[in-house]
């Protein structure tokens, strides 16, 4: 093996090591964000003050009921955004 081939082989090994490290960093990042997302999605309590307001409106739409009729307004009105009344 001459000097030129040794340099080429060393560059190949460096590239291979860097690509393996980038791949491991990618897998680690996906795993961390996956665990974080899983813990937020399946958290046993609500994370926002009015988190269930949108869900109650969707239930009314699912049953073909107008959620903006007068008898449903106190329970399902959601016109102020996520900060109400924080």
Image (cartoon, grey):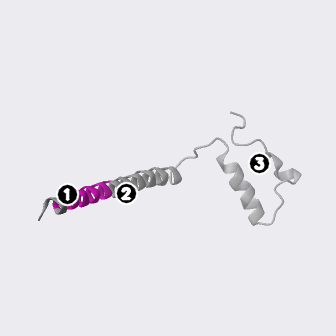
Please give left or right for residue 5 compared with residue 68 in the image: left
Does the magenta-highlighted stretch encompass residue 27? no
Q: Position of residue 59 (x, y in %)?
A: 72, 60
**Which residue is the site of mark 3?**
75
Point out which mark residue 63 bears: none
Q: Which residue is nearer to you in this view: 40 or 77?
A: 40
- Mark 3 lies on a secondary structure that is helix
Residue 52's place in the image compared with 65, above or below, is above
User: Which mark is nearer the camera, 1 or 3?
Assistant: 1
**Which residue is the site of mark 1?**
7
**Which residue is the site of mark 2?**
27
Does the magenta-highlighted stretch encompass residue 8? yes
Q: Which residue is nearer to you in this view: 6 or 24?
A: 6
Segment colored magenta = 6-21
- Mark 2 lies on a secondary structure that is helix
User: Which mark is nearer the camera, 3 or 2?
Assistant: 2
Which residue, as the protein is rendered here, is positioned at the far top?
86
**Which image quadrant for residue 67?**
bottom right
**Which residue lies at the image location 75% right of the left edge and 55% below the top edge?**
57
Which residue, as the protein is rendered here, is positioned at the far right?
70
Disc 3 versus disc 2: distance between alpha carbons? Answer: 44 Å
Q: Residues within 10 Å of mark 1 (few under 14, many from 20)?
A: few
Q: Which residue is nearer to you in this view: 68 or 72?
A: 68
Disc 1 versus disc 3: distance between alpha carbons? Answer: 73 Å
Mark 2 and mark 1 lie on one chain; the one further toward the N terminus is 1
**Which residue lies at the image location 73% right of the left edge and 43% below the top edge?**
81
**Which image quadrant for residue 9?**
bottom left
Q: Residues within 10 Å of mark 3 (few under 14, many from 20)?
A: few
Disc 2 versus disc 1: distance between alpha carbons? Answer: 30 Å
**Which residue lies at the image location 32% right of the left edge and 58% below the top edge?**
19
**Which residue lies at the image location 37% right of the left edge and 57% below the top edge?**
27
**Which image quadrant for residue 84?**
top right
């Amino acid at each position: 093996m001459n000097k030129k081939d040794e340099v080429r082989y060393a560059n190949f090994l460096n590239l291979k090591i860097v690509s393996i490290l980038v791949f491991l960093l990618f897998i680690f990042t996906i795993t961390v964000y996956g665990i974080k997302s899983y813990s937020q999605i399946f958290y046993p309590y609500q994370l926002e003050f009015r988190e269930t307001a949108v869900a109650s409106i969707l239930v009314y739409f699912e049953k073909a009921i107008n959620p903006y009729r007068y008898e449903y307004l106190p329970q399902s009105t959601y016109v102020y955004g996520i900060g109400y009344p924080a």
